[in-house]
Image (spheres, helix red, strand yellow):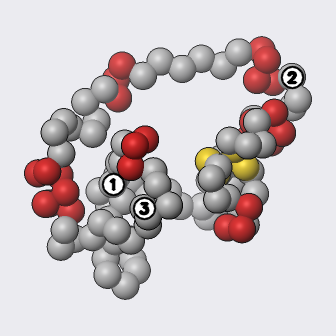
Amino acid sequence: MAQGLASDYPQSYTASMAMRDRPGRIYVDYVRNSRGATAIGAYSTRARPGAAVATPVAWEELTPELRGDLYNVKNLGGRLMSLKADPWADMGKVRQALTPAMFDKL
């Protein structure tokens, strides 16, 4: 599916792990299911300098200025208090479906 998305919509998606191939596109990470792969849950602290925290962001916040280490254990509380709405409020309302056309190139 990841390869199909990247092939059908190369301006929007990439399946390449190389950072140089990602700017301006969504990386569809298809290797997360491999043995030994790890995933980061929302609000978990990353084992990196500065203790960056994984946090949900709105589509509008996805700008070139957004960095993976922007939110950390010191400033995340302030970010959450400044939000006008719970970032998870509509998660249960999201409805997505796979269509046959998505599998055409697989």
Q: Is residue 66 left or right of residue 6?
A: left
Q: How far apart are marks 3 and 2 (CA)?
A: 34 Å
Q: Determine which of the numbered discs, if any, sits on residue 104 in the image.
A: 2
Judged by depth in the image, the label closer to the viewer, 3 or 2, is 3
Looking at marks 3 and 2 on the same chain, the residue that comes earlier in the sequence is marked by 3
Q: In this view, does 7 lie above or below 16?
A: above
Q: Is residue 104 left or right of residue 56?
A: right
Camera-side residue of 40 and 25 = 25
Kind of residue indicated by mark 3? Leu
Looking at marks 1 and 3 on the same chain, the residue that comes earlier in the sequence is marked by 1
Classed neighbour count for the residue bearing mark 3: other residues with Cα under 10 Å, few (<14), some (14–19), many (≥20): few
Camera-side residue of 27 and 40 = 27
Q: Determine which of the numbered discs, if any, sits on residue 66 in the image.
A: 3
Residue at 76% across, 23% down? 102
Kind of residue indicated by mark 2? Asp
> Residue 20 placed where, x, y %?
72, 68
Please state, as top left, top right, bottom left or bottom right, where the C terminus lies in the image. Answer: top right
Classed neighbour count for the residue bearing mark 1: other residues with Cα under 10 Å, few (<14), some (14–19), many (≥20): some
Q: Is residue 4 above or below residue 52?
A: above
Judged by depth in the image, the label closer to the viewer, 1 or 3, is 3
Q: Is mark 2 on a helix, strand or loop?
A: loop
Residue at 27% across, 70% down? 72
Which residue, given by chain and number where applicable, does mark 1 sit on? 55
Q: How far apart are marks 1 and 3 (CA)?
A: 12 Å
Residue at 42% across, 61% down? 66
Q: How far apart are marks 1 and 2 (CA)?
A: 34 Å
> Residue 3 placed where, x, y %?
80, 42
